[in-house]
Amino acid sequence: MTSATAPFQDMPPAELLRRLYDAAVQRALPLHTLGAHLPPPPRGRTVVIGAGKAGGAMAQAVEALWPAEAPLSGLVVTRYHHTPPRPQGLPQRIEVVEASHPVPDEAGMAAAERILAAVQGLTADDLVLCLISGGGSALLTLPCEGLTLQDKQRINRELLECGAHIGEMNTVRKHLSRIKGGRLATLCAPARMITLTISDVPGDDPSVIASGPTVPDASTCADALAILDRYGIALPAAVRARLEAGELESPKPDDPRFAGQEVRMIATPQQSLEAAAALAASLGLPAHILSDEVEGESREVGKVHAALARSVALGRSAFQAPCVLLSGGETTVTVRPLQPGQTRGKGGRAGEFCLGLAQSLAGHPRIWALAADTDGIDGMEENAGARVDPGTLARAAAQGLKVTDHLARNDAHGFFQALDDLVVTGPTHTNVNDFRAILIL
């Protein structure tokens, strides 16, 4: 197929980019991926536990695929409004409850307590299926002794706003918890445990996903303290003293209680990028996956992507136009101090990436882009992300909008909402993190 007859040329760029995003999401849906990783039923009980934005969909997939005659019970916690509609005729054998994300709440604490109760008294004949996806760190909250829920909420907010990357945030969370950092797995022994995981982190490290509640933790109390000090995040004096003394250390890889436990990765960011690339290729559009592990400040990552796209458009790249550049990973947003008279905006990683991208592209006539979170929620708003096109800055100027002002207030949502360029999908019931597609024609 030649570019002169390629189907993508008959498709509006915004539609094409949205189809690539949808293909990435579809590849990561639990019902499409989970079946190949389920073990046979055990001689004893099967208890399903878990947490994450995909928790409800993962629980339904297990219910649909598990033998009807085999015992099955359990409890999974997901984000508010992220439980998918139940298919007609599918009996509910796993309870799904909802809690707050990204800042934990009482419902998440109650769910964590109930999950601990559900795994008491297990035997070597029993099986625990743990369903883990992104968001589980906030949803599965059980503060260590001496730390209140209000303390955890404050620490979470400060970690989110300071620009800490996901590995740093989860190192802290593991050492301030009674359930994260492998502690949940140790409480399930001697039962066999299989953790089914959807990755939302760069590198697909299971000890980072949802703060690794079923995975040994190689990080230390000293690591957690160093991160807290780096970002100026305070702890109650008694809890800080326990960290300094090493009393809140997490279970390590040599702990015998992890023997025989398995982690099975059922969906990853790379697989979703490959699905988008395959769709692009089927439409006659060359696709290039830059990386599924892109990290950094969102607006700066946007500027780097803009430079790459401009290079392609100028014929100075190993990639030739027309093509689409795909990337994933997890960027960060540092919340800037407000100047007198400014009001705090709204937005998330994908929107702020698009602001940085649009500013750097400066209305380039041959470049379009979409950036969105694969869970359907960018930050805490109703949108998954945003779009950028050659007319973005001109339309913004016509409304008196300035990119610099919106970046200063971290207000990507307000900027792209005014342009009707938000990408709104609703909860997707999966989560393989950031998705970015830049189309160069």
Image (cartoon, grey):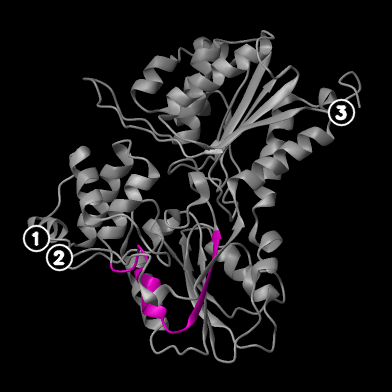
Q: Residue at x 55, y 77 (%)?
A: 94
Residue 114 in view (yes/no): no
Tell me: residue 116, above or below residue 134. Answer: below
Tell me: residue 79, above or below residue 440. Answer: below
- Pick the quarter of the image with the C terminus: top right
Quick check: marks 1 and 2 in contact, CB under 8 Å?
Answer: yes
* Label annotation for residue 7: 3
Does residue 193 appear left or right of residue 312 in this picture? left
- Residue 406, percent across and down? 40, 21
Residue 418 in view (yes/no): yes
**Neighbourhood count class around disc 3 (C-alpha, 10 Å): few under 14, some 14–19, many 20 upward:** some
Q: Amino acid at mark 3?
A: Pro
Q: Residue at x 33, y 35 (%)?
A: 163
Q: Amino acid at mark 1?
A: Ala
Q: Residue at x 67, y 78 (%)?
A: 66
- Residue 247, percent across and down? 17, 65
Say whether disc 1 or disc 2 marks the residue closer to the N-terminus: 2
Q: Residue at x 55, y 51 (%)?
A: 431
Report helix, strand or loop for mark 1. helix
Q: Which mark's residue is nearer the viewer, 1 or 3?
A: 1
Specify the quadrant of the image occupied by residue 64: bottom right
Say whether disc 1 or disc 3 marks the residue closer to the N-terminus: 3
Q: Which residue is mark 1?
A: 238
Specify the quadrant of the image occupied by residue 18: top right
Start and end of the magenta stretch?
Answer: 178-197
Report helix, strand or loop for mark 2. loop
